[in-house]
Amino acid sequence: MKLVRGAWKILVGIKDGLVLIFMLLFFGILFAALSAKPNGTVRDGALLLKLDGPIVEQPENVSPFAAMQGGRAQHQFRLRDLVRAIDAAKDDSRVKVVVLDLDGYGGGYPAAVTEVANALGRVKASGKPVLAYATAYTDGSYLLAANASEVWLNPMGGTLFMGPGGNQLYYKGLIDKLGVNVHVYRVGKFKSFVEPYERDAQSPEAKEALTALYASIFSQWKDLVHKARPKAQIDTFLTAPDQAIAATKGDIAHANLASGLVDKLGDRLAFGKRVAQLAGDGPKKVAGSFATIKYDDFVAAHPMASSGDKIGIVTVAGDIVDGKAGPGTAGGDTIAKAVLDGLAKKDLKALVVRIDSPGGSALASERIRKAVLEAKTQKLPIVVSMGGLAASGGYWVSTVGDPGAVFAEPNTITGSIGIFGIIPTFENSLKKLGITTDGVKTTPLSGQPDIYGGTNKQVDSILQASIEHGYAEFIGRVAAARKMTPQRVDEIGQGRVWDGGTARQLGLVDRFGTLDDAVAEAAKRAGIDPKNVRRVYLEKQPGWFAQLVQGFADKDDDDAGAADDTKAGDLFAMLAAQRQDVLARALGDAKRLATVNSVQARCLECVGFSDARADEDDRTLAQMLIKAIWQ
């Protein structure tokens, strides 16, 4: 009887727990539904672009729990929506001024930031005012601000330019101390993703490649800033910032002003009053507020074309992983299914493959490539558009493009043609603890790869041969797509990463252009009018619950204006946040590399080119580590 009563109590406890969960879910959804607001009416005012999150190709889903707690971990701005909104603001008479709030700027890859900067430049060139404000600008946010009519800086802040580069962590010393044996199987002398686990310093090959890449990307940044803001003496702040700041006795903001980097020094109150002169006062007449057009409302008021000949857009964004994945991560099965479902309708005139990925699983990359190639059975043109990056597995996917139809930007990061696999074993670690292994084996591969006892020569030979075969497959696909010999592809491959300009010279891409240019080319090849095109994004659409959560997370404060310093921080705060993100990315790399379970075509260097905040989980891990050290 005791056993029966115990079982009954367990069942009742499970029932009560399920009821509680469903009640919490019900009231959470009800609360979100009552709190969420539909898109508002667009009235005359300032289009407020508060870029407090990263500029991305495909935003991730908002966590329901973060949304129900009254906030969001990170606001992500879809590149195409942001550019469309800025271009629409140029001709929309309701928009009196475009306001860039760059405190808490979330970053983005160079090509994405450049595209937004160019759109802002078009607004300024039209004669419509563009005003930018920050307490401290980063390299990326300053490129955006440089395209503004007026650049404001908080007098208590200041801006220093860092340029790409910096140190990264190498774990070999720690690995040796722990006794972990890291077995690396790779091809490509420039394939540096696994170097932190094999070496205690950067290899000469990796240093050579990164030096050239950094120089090219940084040169392009300087050229873009000089073009947008000729009076800005940025070279002084790049070569001798200490001298420029010493001349103002340590007042960085006034040094920025004296060098023409900014136009005005003023706090948010002064900035808000200036915007109000152009856009009108806010509805509550609070000092420093102004009539505001909310970004989400404005995007909704300027939707993409809903009629015309259909061109399918396949988005490969984020890490390429096996199986299914949500937005912002390129799940091989998820993307392949969306592509095949779209092609099954037989109403598409062409396909454009938009890539913004550092790569990942070679198997998933091939899964996506094969699905896209099904378009050829319907004789559809296939055009490739590279965004911020299309490296390793991202470049693998790009080989689907028709001859002459691979677009990139001059500062797109691409190439990294190479693959690797990694398996850690712990035989030496266990010996330090007095633990040994033994057993019976029927073949040389019994129990292999053995994470307790280590790998043997046979399995090492097989796995390395498999990686070399995979690299040969990669080389063969690139050679066929780019009309090169395998030997030539091998010369420019070897895992080396290139900027878009150099990649074009090497023949890895065909021409420069944005996604709009790629769509226009697809229309031309399909024989349809580029002005009568409807873009159909072949991706899984969010369900009603996901949309509800997103709407709840996107709700904004009703007060208009710029009097919000919740994201602001001075120069020291900005530098501290950047360094913490560097640590977070390093921890994330360690975590991901320790858990890879397939052959990888991934680019390590690529992530460092985005000044976007690190992954939220990795940042949490970094904060825990910092607290543990200080405590």
Image (cartoon, rainbow, N blue to C red):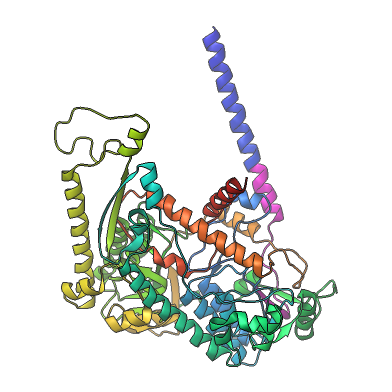
Side of 424 relative to 269 (left or right): left
Side of 573 relative to 498 (left or right): right
Q: Could you tell me which residue is drawn at 55 percent across and 54 percent down?
A: 619
Above or below, comparing residue 62 to residue 302 in the picture = above
| Residue 605 falls within the magenta-colored stretch | no
| Residue 29 falls within the magenta-colored stretch | yes
Residue 487 in sight: yes
In-front residue for pair 206/125: 206
Above or below, comparing residue 499 to residue 185 in the picture = below
Q: Position of residue 203 (x, y in %)?
A: 33, 65
Give the quarter of the image for residue 207.
bottom left
Q: Furthest residue to the top?
A: 1
In-front residue for pair 456/24: 456
Residue 131 in sight: no
Q: Position of residue 205 (x, y in %)?
A: 30, 69
Q: Furthest residue to the left?
A: 443
Q: What is the span of residues highlighted in magenta in the rendered image?
A: 26-49
Q: Position of residue 420 (x, y in %)?
A: 28, 57
Give the quarter of the image for residue 198.
bottom left
Q: Could you tell me which residue is drawn at 49 percent across and 87 percent down?
A: 223
Above or below, comparing residue 349 to residue 448 in the picture = below
Instruction: Name the image quarter holding the C terminus.
Output: top right
Q: Could you tell me which residue is drawn at 50 percent across and 80 percent down?
A: 115
Q: Position of residue 264 (x, y in %)?
A: 72, 85
